[in-house]
Image (cartoon, helix red, strand yellow):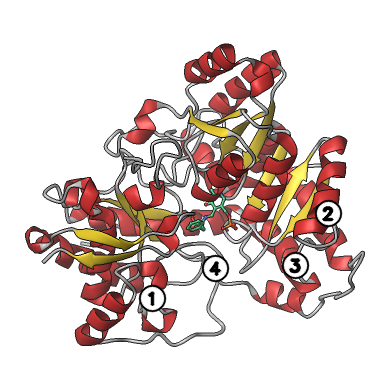
Amino acid sequence: MPNSKKRSWAEPFKIKMVEPLSMTTIQDRQRYIQEAGYNTFLLRSKDVYIDLLTDSGTSAMSDRQWAGIMLGDEAYAGSENFYRLEDSVKRFYGYKYLIPTHQGRGAEHLLSRILIKDGDYIPGNMYFTTTRLHQELAGGTFVDVIIDEAHDPENLFKFKGNIDTDKLIKLIESKGADKIPYICVATTVNMAGGQPISMQNLKEVRNVADKYGIDIVHDMTRVAENAYMIQQHEEGYSNKSVAEIVKEICSLTDHATMSAKKDALVNIGGFLATNKEDVYTEASNWVVVYEGLHTYGGLAGRDMEAMAIGIAESVQDDHIRARIGQVHYLGEKLLSYNIPVVMPLGTHGIFLDAKRILPHVPQDNYPAQTLAAELYLDSGVRSMERGIVSAGRNEETGKHNYPKLELVRLTIPRRVYTQAHMDVVAESVLSVYENRDKIKGMEMVYEPKYLRFFQAKFKKIE
Ligand code: P71
């Protein structure tokens, strides 16, 4: 019986242009994945059916954004689009100074280089691969101060992106505040499964930062998604708009790095933003060395225009409700099949718990990497390993880091796929799950030195 009380969410857009998908046979896929060394990063996208590798740079732009592309002011210096972007960043995020960069890691590079000295420690709510590497390359050591619950995929706490302020204070007291250039706060926490931080926790972190005179750097890659979770689940926020909550989050931080390829709905772009003039001055000097002049930072004028418009669209309540609604639709479907996924459901994707799906595969044989390859083999759905391969090696001992979370991420691009695609994905995961006993692990046969997950190659254990 249909339930007349139930009201579904629907996408707040209609589709104006389509891009055909290609289908492959199982024989094709066997060849493609073997040639790719069982690494989904090394597949050609034409050989992928539904691409859930990442939500980064893969979103669909709106007709407004595409129209903005035609308004590119391709001047080397002082492009009109830079000023429009600056205006958007001030209006929606509230930061005073803006330096565009080619993407998020460009901003991470500049900020790490400016703020970190040799021997410093950088506390953060769980590591992110590129963020941590830039901190290390600048001479720092990342320290994970996220709450313990974040490392437990079955824990149902709503704000698993929170920082454990006791851990944070202990670190500051033991190393000395002069060894902590900043606290890194990500909204949401990608590696924990797309988990949000609460406003209350952020305020507590702000208090600690103020007490010790330490800055906060905001990795605001998915800030609108985090704001939506606050609106839905934190007391006192249900009547505030996502846009208001986003602005409040930003107001509690000093500097920001942004990969606009996620929340801000563009295919390329990012920025560094700050409220501090001295950091801005130094960043505008370094940016010309590594990215481009401070009014374009490696981007075309048209890219900055699309970003300025994307930022405004990204904080609309109906957009973000439908975006996270779709992610949760897939999650609920997998849960109804009893497939172990990270709980609570995250905001940018659903994370399969490879440790529980393949308990018979030791972590040294890369369960998540194996599961991602099997999913591709089954249906051509591309996902991403977020486990031991992503975690890399310990700098000193040279041994693998063994993360508690061994996950396969089904990441949903924004405004790209339909509910029917989500059904197909869920059915494919189920089919792999039903055959899980036959799955053995893999061995690594090639390992690059930096960010090894991008290019590592594997072979199956027969
Ligand atoms: C994602 C990505 C893109 C990516 C990066 C590294 C390995 C695999 C995939 C990028 C992020 C991110 C956060 C929280 C900074 C960056 C870097 N995420 N912080 O999830 O999620 O931004 O890619 O624009 O350089 O697939 P960048």
Tell me the crowding category of disc 3: few under 14, some 14 to 19, or many 20 or more residues within 10 angstroms, Cα based.
Answer: many
Q: Nearer the observer, disc 2 or disc 1?
A: 1
- Residue with the mark numbered 3: 299
Q: Do the residues under discs 3 and 4 have CB atoms within 8 angstroms? A: no
Compute the Cα span from label 3 to label 2: 17 Å
**Secondary structure under badge 1?**
loop
- Residue with the mark numbered 1: 43
Q: Is residue 315 visible?
A: no
| First reached walking from the N terminus: tag 3 or tag 2 | 2
Query: Which quarter of the image is occupied by the N terminus?
Result: bottom left
- Give x and y (percent) for residue 303: 73, 70
Give the vertical position of 249 relative to 369 (above or below): above
Please, what is the three-letter code of the amino acid marked with disc 3?
A: Leu
Identify the residue at horizontal 84%, vertical 50% (top origin).
284
**Secondary structure under badge 4?**
loop
For this orientation, the residue located farthest to the front is 397
- Residue with the mark numbered 4: 59
Q: Do the residues under discs 2 and 4 have CB atoms within 8 angstroms? A: no
Compute the Cα span from label 1 to label 3: 27 Å
Q: Nearer the observer, disc 1 or disc 3?
A: 1
Q: Which mark is residue 87?
A: 2
| First reached walking from the N terminus: tag 1 or tag 3 | 1
Compute the Cα span from label 2 to label 4: 23 Å
